[in-house]
Image (spheres, rainbow, N blue to C red):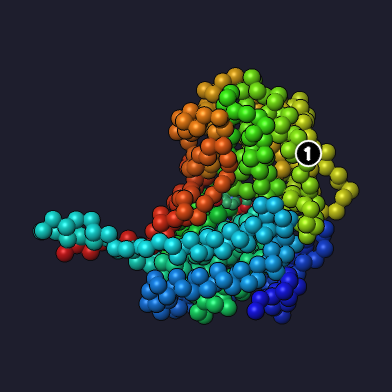
Amino acid sequence: MGYANATEILAAITEPGADQQVLDPATGAPVGAVRNRTVDELNDAVAAARAAQPAWDARGHEERCALLNAAADAIEENAEALAELLSREQGKPLNGPNARFEVGGSVAWLRAATAYDVEPEVVVDDGETYAVKHYRPLGVVGAIGPWNWPMMISIWQIAPSLRMGNTVVLKPSENTPLSVLALGHVLNQVLPADVLHIVPGGRDVGESLSGHPEIDKIMFTGSTPTGKAIIRSSADTVKRLTLELGGNDPGIVLEDADPQAIAQDLFWGAFINTGQTCAALKRLYVPESIYDQVCQALSEVARAMPMGVGLDENNVLGPLQNKAQYEIVSGLVQDAVSSGARVLLGANPDTEAAGYFYPTTLIADIDPQNPLVVEEQFGPALPIVKVKDVEEAIELANSLPVGLGASVWSSDKAKATEVAAQIKAGTIWVNSHGTIDPRVPFGGAKQSGYGLEFGLDGLKALAQPQIIKA
Ligand code: NAD
C-alpha cells in the first residue's frame, strides 16, 4: 500500500530534530523540514554502505534486477504522493512534462537499468591466448545531484550503480532534499538494508563525499564550476568520475524548416521545466529568411502556456526553484533589454507577487555575444539570434566552452543530419531538443562533462573492467 499524498509521505520521512525549513518556491509556504547530516554521519553512512556491498554483489544480476523492478513498482504505487511533494518542493507543475512526468521517468530509467545483460566479453581467443573482460562492481558509489530534476537524476545515479553490484551514498541538493529523501524512503522499503543511503547536507558533505577514501566513484550532475571542484577533491584517491555538467545548448533552424510545424517542439525544447534543464535549448539561431515567421510562431505557442502554482492542474510552467536562479535569469534579461535587444514576450516580472515566477520570455534581435546568449540562463528566457547562413550558425553554436546537447531543425532530415555532424556536443537532436531516452547513451562534450549515462554504456560506466588472460 502506498502513501496517499505528500503530507503522508512527509510525515514518514520527517525526523526529530529536522530544523532546516524547505519553502515552496511558488508560494513561500513551508513544505517540510530536513535534518542535515554532519560529516561524521556521512562517514557512518559510507561505512555501512561499504559493509553491505559484498552481500549485495553476491546476489547476482538476476536477483538485483528483480529487486530494482520491485523498487520501480513501489515508486508507481506512490507516484501521486511523490509527484505532489516534488511539485511543492521543486515548483514544477504536476502536469505537462513536469512532476508526474518526472516520477514516470524515474520508473522508466529504473526498469531500463535491468534491461541489459552485462556479460563477460572474450577479447582474444586464438588457441594460444584466452583473454576475457569482466565487469566487476566498483564498490561504493557517491552520488551528488542538482535541484532541477531531483528524483529522476537521483535514479540515473542510483539505478545503474545498484544494478552493477555497487552500493550508493547519495547527497541531494540542499534545495530539494525532501523529494530525494521521499524517493529513497520508497526505494528502501524494497531494497536490502544499507545498499542505499540518502545523506542530506550542504557543500561540506558534498566535498567530503567527493574526497572520501572509501568512495570508489562519484556520479555528479550539477554545474561546471562544482564539477571542477569535484575533479580536484577526487584527485588524491584517483576516483572514477561521471560528470554531467552545465550546458548552453544551441538550436539551429535551417532555411527549409516550417516555422508553424516546429514551434511547439522548439518551445518545449527550451522551456521544459521552465527552462531549468541541463539539456534545454538555451540559444536559438535562425536564418534571416524565416526569422520573423519563427519568432511569431514561437511567440504564439509561448503566450498560450499557463504558468502558475504547480498543484493547479491547468499549469504547465512553474516558478524558478530558488531566489539565486531567479536573480540570474532576471539580471541576464535586464542586461539584454538594456543592450537594445527586442522583447517579443515577457521580461516584465511582477516583483510584488509571491514566489519566484519569471514570465516566459523571448528576446529577438540580440547580439550573438550578449551574456543572455553566451551564459547559461537556466530559466524561462530564450534568446533568438538572427544569422545570415548555416555556416555562421554552426560557428556560433561551436563557439562556447560547453557542449552538452544541440539541435537542428529542418524539413530535410538528411540535410539536418549533415549539419548535426558538424556540431561539437554530446547529443545532437534533429527536429526535437532534449528528448532523452533510457536506451540511448547521454553525456557531454567539452566542459559539459565526461562519461556516459543510460543504456549498456551507462551500466558499464558503473563497473570496474577486469581482464583475465590465461
Ligand atoms: P550545483 O553545482 O550548484 O550543485 C550540485 C550539487 O553539488 C549540490 O548537491 C551541491 O550541494 C553540491 N556541491 C556544491 N559544491 C560542492 C563541492 N565543492 N563538492 C561537492 N559537492 C558540491 O548545481 P545546481 O545549481 O544544483 O544545478 C544546476 C546546474 O546543473 C546547471 O548548470 C545545469 O546545467 C546542471 N545540470 C546538468 C545536467 C546534465 O546531465 N549534464 C543535469 C541537470 C543539471
Residue at which label 1 appears: 303
| 52 and 252: which is toward the camera | 252
Residue 412 shows in this picture: yes
Q: Quadrant of residue 457?
A: bottom left
Which quadrant holds the N terminus? bottom right
Q: Is residue 151 above or below residue 408?
A: below
Q: Is residue 445 above or below residue 93?
A: above
Residue at 66%, 52% in the rendered image:
97
Badge 1, how many Cα within 10 Å: few under 14, some, many 20+? some
Provide residue 109's location: percent of width, then percent of height.
Answer: 52, 60
Q: Is residue 454 left or right of residue 377?
A: left
Q: Secondary structure at mark 1?
A: helix
Q: Quadrant of residue 106?
A: bottom right
| 203 and 345: which is toward the camera | 345
Q: Amino acid at mark 1?
A: Arg
Provide residue 278's location: percent of width, then percent of height.
Answer: 59, 47
